[in-house]
Amino acid sequence: MTWIAPHIERRELPTVAPEREMLQGWLDWHRDTLLAKCAGLTPDQLVEASTPPSSLTLLGLVRHLTDVERTWFRVRFAGEQIGDHYFTEEDVDADFHDIDPAAAEANVAAFRAEIEACDATVADRGLDETFLARQGRTLSLRWIYVHMIEEYARHNGHADLLRERIDGVTED
């Protein structure tokens, strides 16, 4: 039997909440949205590119956001000395290239595990805590949350179009 991307119930968005809960709620909702766009699809459908010459796929987006989560929360903010899942020095877009449908289940599992690890890494950290980023910029954990919400919102728009092209599904 072929693996099918599982159905996911998106968490409710908080409408009145303290800042941290609001930011976490929006980030979780966007994470869930990406998985919802993949739900019910086969590995072959998850690696179906949008239109040539683009290599953009739903599974590529999952892989990309796995590394983006790790990079911002764990590597840059927390300073963990860990490698990337998919990015390479030779190909910074490796998350979108040479995707094997047989690895779809493992890629989705890696995404979910990375989200858990990222959330655990920053659970007890303050939004005002800062770190020194590239080009000598000082950024805060709050900045990362806002950036990640923006990153997911942009890529979930891509996921909407990909999903519609694959099977016509347009619901959010």
Image (tube, helix red, strand yellow):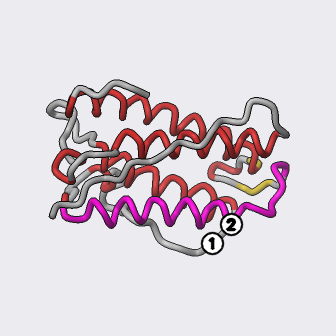
Rendered location of residue 16, percent (x, y): 81, 31
Q: Closer to the camera: disc 2 or disc 1? A: 2
Could you tell me which secondary element the residue under label 2 belongs to? helix
Magenta stretch, main secondary structure class: helix
Amino acid type, callout 1:
Glu
- Residue 70 visible, this orientation: yes
Horizontal arrangement in the rendering, residue 77 relative to residue 28 (left or right): right
The one nearer the camera, 15 or 78, is 15
The number of discs equals: 2
- Residue 75 visible, this orientation: no
Q: Are circles 2 and 1 on residues that touch, CB within 8 Å?
A: yes
Residue at left offset 71%, top offset 41%: 23
Horizontal arrangement in the rendering, residue 134 relative to residue 162 (left or right): right
The one nearer the camera, 118 or 6, is 6
Residue at left offset 57%, top offset 34%: 150
Q: Quadrant of the C terminus?
A: top left
Q: Quadrant of the N terminus?
A: bottom left
Residue 135 belongs to magenta span: no
Which residue bears the numbered disc 1?
Answer: 80
Amino acid type, callout 2:
Thr
Residue at left offset 67%, top offset 38%: 146
Which residue bears the numbered disc 2?
Answer: 121
Q: Is residue 22 above or below residue 71?
A: above
Of marks 2 and 1, which one's residue comes earlier in the chain? 1
Magenta span covers which residues?
102-128
Rendered location of residue 80, percent (x, y): 63, 72
Distance between the Cα atoms at labels 2 and 1?
10 Å
Q: Is residue 67 above or below residue 60?
A: below
Residue 116 belongs to magenta span: yes
